[in-house]
Amino acid sequence: MKYLLALIGFVIVVSLALAEPAETTLAPVYQISPIGWVRKAADRTIIEIDKRYQPALLGLDELDTIWVLYWFDRNDTPKKRSILQVHPRANPENPLRGVFATRAPFRPNLIAMSRCRIVSVKDNIIEIDAIDAFADTPVLDIKP
Amino acid sequence: MKYLLALIGFVIVVSLALAEPAETTLAPVYQISPIGWVRKAADRTIIEIDKRYQPALLGLDELDTIWVLYWFDRNDTPKKRSILQVHPRANPENPLRGVFATRAPFRPNLIAMSRCRIVSVKDNIIEIDAIDAFADTPVLDIKP
């Protein structure tokens, strides 16, 4: 009898352990890191690429414009990342919209994208005409 | 003499310990998770948005086209993420280019973007005309 109860207990514990992952089903998490940063001086806007990624710039000087993907790092809090609807341009008179229907800097994944004109590329420095991002914003990717 | 040696040893150990963070300066890491997935049926391509993000779709039905940002999940290995130069379109006759000058699916941050035409939006399902992504690819963001 004692062994039977122990066996039943064992089966229950194993069943619960096996059942748990199926019930929680956490979304996968991917990790990203800056490949550079937006820098702003008096009259210049540059993207300073991390030296270790400089080889990834080969041929970039042949392009006129690039997509710059960056991270809304100032909004990287669970609270701000949970905002799903906004009044566009922070104007309460604009009807509520889902963040996926806007370019709002509040969204589950804080990825921003801007089309920028290249002024010059030298070593690890891309000078661009302008970008709608704060100075020292982390840059995630550059694409043609 | 014994105490002096101990003191020197202590100073060296503390100096090394204090110096280490400045020398390694690890890049920050940001975490992202899928907000949905690309699904492909016989003649339909849809983006299935995670139910919890459905409120973020409000107003999306007023748009004709969207940017779909997704994750090259099949290349999420340290080795593939360290590739910085490629022969475009995997053709060795194309001169080597930095990944930031191409749309290659190998890059430090595996973010992809495609412009897609909306066919319909219903509940948490966005039907689109087509997307150059594998079935079940994780979607990171939707933007106008």
Image: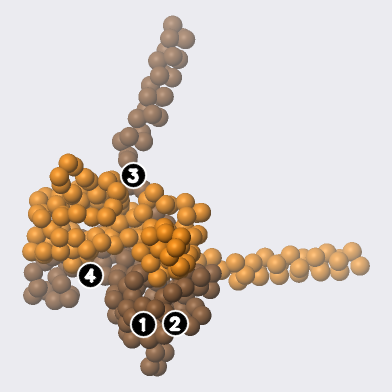
Chain colours: A brown, B orange
Residue A26 picture location, percent across and down: 34, 44
Crowding at dot 4, Cα within 10 Å, few <14 / some 14-19 / many 20+, comes out as many
Vertical placement of residue B117 versus A121, above or below: above
What residue is pinned by disc 4?
Answer: A104
Disc 1 vs disc 3: which is toward the camera?
Answer: 1
Distance between mark 4 and mark 3 Cα atoms: 26 Å
- Subunit that carries the residue with mark 1: A
Distance between mark 4 and mark 1 Cα atoms: 25 Å
For label 3, the SS is loop
Report whether mark 4 lies on the same chain as mark 1: yes
Circles 2 and 1, Cβ within 8 Å, touching? The answer is yes
- Subunit that carries the residue with mark 2: A
Residue A2 picture location, percent across and down: 46, 9
As drawn, is A28 to the left or to the right of A52?
Answer: left
For label 1, the SS is strand
What residue is pinned by disc 1?
Answer: A118
Distance between mark 2 and mark 4 Cα atoms: 30 Å
Distance between mark 2 and mark 1 Cα atoms: 8 Å
Which of disc 2 and disc 3 is earlier in sequence?
Answer: 3
- Subunit that carries the residue with mark 3: A
Three-letter code, disc 2: Val
Three-letter code, disc 1: Ile
The residue positioned 51% from the left and 54% from the top of the image is B79
Residue A46 picture location, percent across and down: 41, 83
Residue A90 picture location, percent across and down: 17, 75
Report whether mark 4 lies on the same chain as mark 3: yes
Report the disc number at residue A26: 3
Vertical placement of residue B20 versus B138, above or below: below
